[in-house]
Amino acid sequence: MLRLWSFLRHFLKRYFDNIPNDKLKKNILQAVPFWIGSIITGIFAVFYAKLFTWAEELLFFILDWKAWLVFLLTPTAFLLSWWIVKRFAPYAKGSGIPQVMASVELANPKENSKIKKLLSWRIMIVKVLSSMVMVMGGGAVGREGPTIQIAGSVFRKVYEYLPAWWPKISKKNMILTGAAAGLSAAFNTPLGGIVFAVEELAKIHINYFKTALFTAIIIAGLTAQTLAGSYLYLGYPKTHGVGLSVMISIIFVSGISGILASKLSVFMLQINEFKKRKLKTDNQRVLFLIVSGLIIASLAFFVHREILGSGKELLERLLFSEDKHQAWYIPIFRMIGPALAFTSGGAGGVFAPALSAGASIGALIAEWGNLSQNATNVVILAGMVAFLTGITRAPFTSAILVLEMTDRHSLIFHLMLAAMVSSLVSMFISKHSLYDMLKQQDLSEIRRRR
């Protein structure tokens, strides 16, 4: 492999040395690493999505066969997912977005070497394995955050493989662009990827990397579509014929979702803090994970199994069937599930669980208001945007993501209203997002371990 790479670098040098226009040569050379990273990211995103879906389908296949196996599967999955991360790559835990945010901040001459702890081939492998184990056991996690960390790792490695004669490229821009390409490929939402890079990650002006960002997202998205086909993450929910009166319900749902999402974020941070203060030994951590797994298993077995998994099944039922009934406790379940899975120490994202939690809140409130089927769909989408905003504090990203994954462009003002209300309300609970707090924790830990 090293010989092949050495030959390829030598061939490229000879080829580009023959280009007479220095400016053209420099522009092409600076673009090539972004193109390569984007293609690899698109391929990884598609295969990871297929593996993740297969793991979730296997879970429900097993439970359809013998429902009581959840008492074995879930605690075992929590333990194994945590052990894989702890043993092989501690910074592969959780979503992956805080790690990418921390990497962007570490992309400076003094701290460049620390990025390898957050973005690497090992991180990628452990991220996939741990998250698959977690979801196979019923953990309420998603694959979107992990895909972003995987993409950041891909782009970082491409950057490091560049020979010394290559024109200078900003490592920060590479990581930023990789993360955006990862989100775009994961959800098939190119605009969402662009907005995410600007709103959530970038601390520099977009003019410095906009061309690389746009091309990387396009290439990653096209690669993913070539392998998986053109698709929407969710589909086309029916929303036509809904009047402006639905705005009242949207405001109410968005306020409730924003408050609950912020409370969930604070609760997850409190669990992490409790674990640091009280769980000093591995035996204590193992006991905590077993208890967490048994709580999830008991709720799934004795009450309802919609607490399990990423929640995509729940989203599809609420948006695309006539069965929009939502028991009052399902929104609580869809918050308990991510709270215990996300803080377990295993890998897994919070995007998809946040969307399903918001959808369940929207469906419940729409049912209380006796809304029509189409109006209920609008309120469900608003709940999704609002809850994701409450977690991420990225209102534009949340609105654009839901807009693109459902192709409901006529609802742009409805979804932006939901994002705005949630963003304002969330600030009363906590000024900082979950990702910001976790990023600071990772940075403090990495800088402490010099």
Image (cartoon, rainbow, N blue to C red):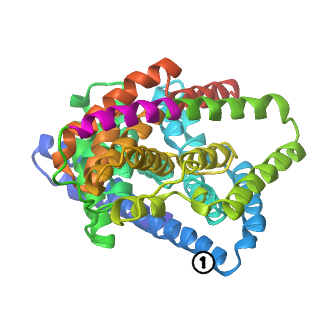
Using residue 14 as the reference point, say whether residue 313 is left or right of it: right
Using residue 320 as the reference point, say whether residue 247 is left or right of it: left
Q: Is residue 2 or residue 117 the one in the foreground?
A: 117
The main secondary structure of the magenta stretch is helix
Q: Which residue is depicted at the point 74% across and 72% down?
A: 69
Q: Position of residue 169 (x, y in %)?
A: 33, 38
Regarding mark 1 in the picture, which secondary structure is present there?
helix
Q: Position of residue 389 (x, y in %)?
A: 40, 35
Q: Is residue 316 or residue 186 the one in the foreground?
A: 316
Q: Position of residue 290 (x, y in %)?
A: 81, 53
Q: Compared with residue 230, is residue 192 higher up or lower down, i.e. above or below?
A: above
Q: Which residue is depicted at the point 16% across and 47% down?
A: 410
Question: Image quarter for residue 306?
Answer: bottom right
User: Which residue is situated farthest in the left direction here?
Assistant: 21
Q: Which residue is depicted at the point 73% across and 48% down?
A: 86
Q: Which residues, given as a range, are shown in magenta?
A: 245-260
Can residue 34 be seen at all in this image of the molecule?
Answer: no
Q: Position of residue 398 (x, y in %)?
A: 35, 40
Kind of residue at badge 1: Phe
Is residue 253 on the magenta stretch? yes
Q: Compared with residue 425, is residue 61 higher up or lower down, i.e. above or below?
A: below
Q: Which residue is depicted at the point 67% across and 28% down?
A: 445
Is residue 39 on the magenta stretch? no
Q: Compared with residue 313, is residue 279 higher up or lower down, i.e. above or below?
A: above
Using residue 224 as the reference point, say whether residue 52 is left or right of it: right
Q: Residues within 10 Å of mark 1 (few under 14, many from 20)?
A: few
Q: Which residue is mark 1?
A: 61
